[in-house]
Amino acid sequence: MELERELSLSLEGVTALACWEPRIGEVFTLVGDGPIFYRARLATLGSRQAVVVPFERFTLAPESPLEIVVYQALPEKERFELVLQKLTEVGVNRIVPYVSRRSVTLEERDAGQKKSHRWPDVLLRAAKQCRRGMIPALAPVLGWEEMLQEVAAADLRLMLYEGETYWSLKEAMDRQNPGRVALLVGPEGGFEADEAARAQAAGVLPVSLGGRILRTETAAILGAAMIQFALGDLG
């Protein structure tokens, strides 16, 4: 791909570009073959065509070769928006909110003032800010059993657990080479014992982040960052 030369996008590219809600003249990350990543400026945009001008090639790819999916028990207040923003910056591919016994439900979250409609915009703004080549996928809120069924598809399945464990998160990742990692993060107050047992029966390994009790949003961000550092592209 030549720099500083206009490039017409395919219809597929135009459709993908629309997800970013771009404006004429806006700069964004363009994914080429390889994949190779470029910074590009939007020159023209129509319903079925777009012209961009790539002007800089990334020396370090903004997307990790590791796929990380974080399953987050729905927290109260604005904590989930913080989780969405920071997990985007860390390089997570997909975020799945779910309901456990100690978490809140979506109805409870939106009872005072509906804020869940803002979540996609939080992801979009965070992805633009950190120059991601993709916007992390946000799943609909899942029930407990639905969540466990989806987690089973990952190569490495980890649960941050405050109870007795035999592994630290660092030890659980030692000598691993997964393509996809599922990280299960519990609510404030943690998992109930039977929930932890059910998750283990489904092949999820309980791991510890240490002796300090962390808020759920801190655990999600720190856990994802440690996985990216050990198995992905951080550091």
Image: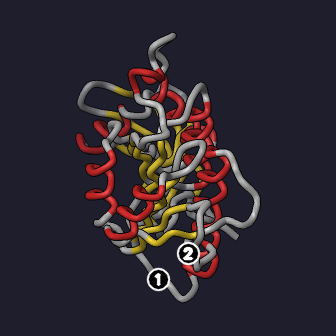
Using the image as rendered, state which of residue 164 and residue 95 is in the foreground.
164
Q: CA distance from mark 1 to mark 2?
A: 7 Å
Residue 9 screen position, x and y as percent: 32, 43
Q: Hey, which quadrant is residue 117 in on the image?
A: top left
Quadrant position of the N terminus in the picture = bottom left
- Give neighbour class at mark 1: few <14, some 14-19, many 20+ (Cα, 10 Å): some
**Residue lying at the far bottom of the rendered structure:** 175
Q: Amino acid at mark 1?
A: Asn
Q: Label 2 belongs to which residue?
A: 231
Q: Amino acid at mark 2?
A: Leu
- Give neighbour class at mark 2: few <14, some 14-19, many 20+ (Cα, 10 Å): many
| Label 1–label 2 contact, CB within 8 A | yes
Element under disc 2: helix
**What color scheme is it?**
secondary structure
Using the image as rendered, state which of residue 115 and residue 148 is in the foreground.
148
Residue 100 screen position, x and y as percent: 41, 43
Res 125 seen here: no
Residue at image position (33%, 47%) is 144
Q: Hey, which quadrant is residue 151 in on the image?
A: bottom left
Q: Hey, which quadrant is residue 67 in on the image?
A: bottom left
Element under disc 1: loop
Residue at image position (40%, 58%) is 194
Count of numbered tags: 2
Q: Label 1 belongs to which residue?
A: 177
Residue at image position (39%, 40%) is 99
**Residue lying at the far front of the rendered structure:** 193
Using the image as rendered, state which of residue 153 and residue 8 is in the foreground.
153
Res 42 seen here: yes
Q: Earlier in the sequence, mark 1 or mark 2?
A: 1
Residue at image position (39%, 42%) is 98
Quadrant position of the C terminus in the picture = bottom right
